[in-house]
Image (tube, rainbow, N blue to C red):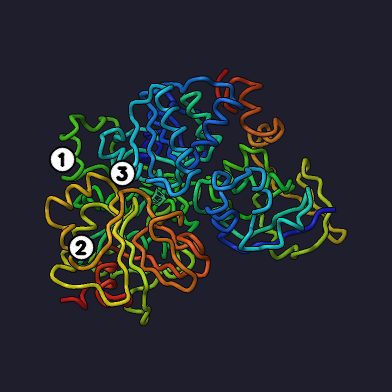
Amino acid sequence: MAQTLAEQIISRAAGRPVRAGENAVVAIDLVMMHDSISPSIIKVLHSELGAERVFDPERVAVVIDHVAPAATIQNAEHQANLRRWVRQQGIRHFFDVGRGISHPVLVEEGLARPGMVIVGSDSHSTGYGTVGAFGTGMGTTDIALALATGRTWLRVPETVRVQAHGHMRPGVSAKDLGLKVAREIGADGATYQSVEWHGLDELSLGERMTLATLSIEVGGKAGIVVPTGAAIEAHMAQHGYQMPEWLRVEARATYSRVVEIDLSVLEPQISVPHQVDTVVDLSALGRVEVDVVYLGTCTNGHHEHMAAAARLMKGRKIAPGVRMIVVPTSSEALLRATEDGTLATLIAAGAAIGTPGCGACIGRHMGVLAPGETCLFTGNRNFRGRMGSPEAQIYLGSPEVAAATALAGYIAHPAELV
Amino acid sequence: MARVWMFGAHVNTDQIVPGRYAPYMLKDEAALRNYPFVEARPEFAAMVQPGDLLVAGPNFGCGSSREYAPLALKMVEVGAIIAPLFARIFYRNALNLGIPCFEADLTSVLHDGQQVETHLNEGVIVANGQTIQLPPPPAFLREVWAAGGIVPYYKQHGRFPGQAG
Ligand code: SF4
């Protein structure tokens, strides 16, 4: 029987052929854990499960990204404990403050690979679908069990297939496609399901991660961008590995739903407060003045996103009264942006640059919002209170819209700049 | 008797417990019991009684993977959560903690503040003399609830539900 990518990956990890709807216990290729809930995970692992060691230190990656560098004495203490624990456990794949956000970092390091089952302590672990892995987010107890046993149980998901056609116009990017899909199928349109993204071979890795991370915003258990195309080939060559030969799109696989999107007519999309799936065409938004433009996160803080913004901002200044905060997704993205002049352009335009990591995405530090403030955010969630005050307004948009907005002072179409 | 606490659609984990009230942000982790719905429904934590029901619209618990959202609900001893559809990470977390979740839409059948009788083991609610039968969750979920959560289950059986011995 033909299988979806999720079914293929879970079958391999379960050691038997599985189909959507079944429960399966699977072997895990990689467990990701980050700073913010590590104290609870370590407690469950040792005190409740009585496990002294993780199942395989080579299959565990630990990243300090959520509050990095530490904002409070308490964070600092938890992070110090986490560093000590990582040493005790002999975990080599440890990425400390400044290396960046877990999902892009594990992709950049070549740890996340096509066909793997990866579980992470963060809901945007769907991001490993950037390279054709089945990545999924879990809570404290599941991650502790995964660390202790190297296994987890999964209900094999049905799959929603997003089929893109044609090419995007200038000023439109993967974020607009992701928000458009949220608009079409809703925040629960793929709950318990995998989202498979087709027709996007020309996308860069960063743009693939935009879609893989947004998959959770439609409820997706995983979000897999079909791992074909030049960017994936180059990435595999760089890390010296090949696509597993058993992983490929099978024409007769069964999908619960196919969502067709014509990229050639796609307009910039804006998600208005306070739900990701309340999305409008930017042209229908009306005038929304902003206090802050925030460019960053695992969804849209990659090198290509900063570079897209810089192209639009070159030689210009951000509007008076607006602050623009740029937080690169990783040190690799920051380094590239330094080398090619992207960063200099953004700084000259008036942007402030933060340490690679999650920044203000979860409202802990590095740019939290005051009551009454409005933010154009390139991240993935605009829930009330997400970035600080519950009385702040968060609009989600692409890096191109972020650049146009920073220059205009209101949420603006990139085409207004040319 | 149990009180019905009615919520809308797409209740996210930032509404259940905002990140600023995460246990690791608190001086005393036990204080988490004071914060379920602290901003979305400030009276909830003080008024909720053990066994009360949360009844919500679709996609309950969407958003982040924070297990302290269902943990806060467990700390105030919520009896069960009933929604037509749960966000999957929340559902797993609630299951792992042993909080019963039933997939049913009772938002137009019950109302906020209503007192009902519950027989959760049988999945039965009695409201205004009317018996409502909730759809039974899959057998392996009931096994986990019966054990009091996935950790006690794993310790008892040395395996996951459904895993060959
Ligand atoms: S950037 Fe935001 S969405 Fe991405 S992992 Fe960090 S907190 Fe989660």
Q: Is residue B106 left or right of residue A230?
A: right
Q: Is mark 2 within 8 Å of ligand 1?
A: no
Q: Which residue is mark 3?
A: A98
Q: Quick one: SS at disc 3?
A: loop
| Label 2 sits on residue | A346
Closer to us: B18 or A285:
B18
Q: Residue at x 37, y 41 (%)?
A: A4
Whether A215 is drawn above or below A180: the answer is: above
Mark 3 and mark 2 lie on one chain; the one further toward the N terminus is 3
Q: Which chain contains the residue that carries disc 2?
A: A
Specify the amino acid type for callout 2.
Leu
Q: Which mark is residue B4?
A: none
Residue depicted at x 71% and y 56%:
B45
Look at discs 1 and 2 and give the one toward the viewer: 2
Q: Are marks 1 and 3 on the same chain?
A: yes
Q: Where does the C terminus of chain A fall, quadrant-wise?
A: bottom left
User: Label 3: chain?
Assistant: A
Q: Nearer the viewer, residue A203 or A74?
A: A74
Q: Are marks 1 and 2 on the same chain?
A: yes
Q: Alpha-carbon distance for marks 1 and 2? A: 28 Å
Check the image and report above or below for A35 versus B151: below
The x, y position of residue A386, in whole percent, is 48, 59
Where does the image place residue B17, in percent across and percent down from the top left?
A: 59, 53
Looking at the picture, does residue A194 appear above or below residue A18?
Answer: below
* Image: A129 above or below B116: above
Element under disc 1: helix
Q: Are marks 1 and 3 in contact (CB under 8 Å)?
A: no
Circle 1 crowding by C-alpha within 10 Å: few under 14, some 14–19, many from 20: few
Spatial separation of the CA atoms under disc 1 and disc 3: 25 Å
Which residue has dot 1 on it? A234
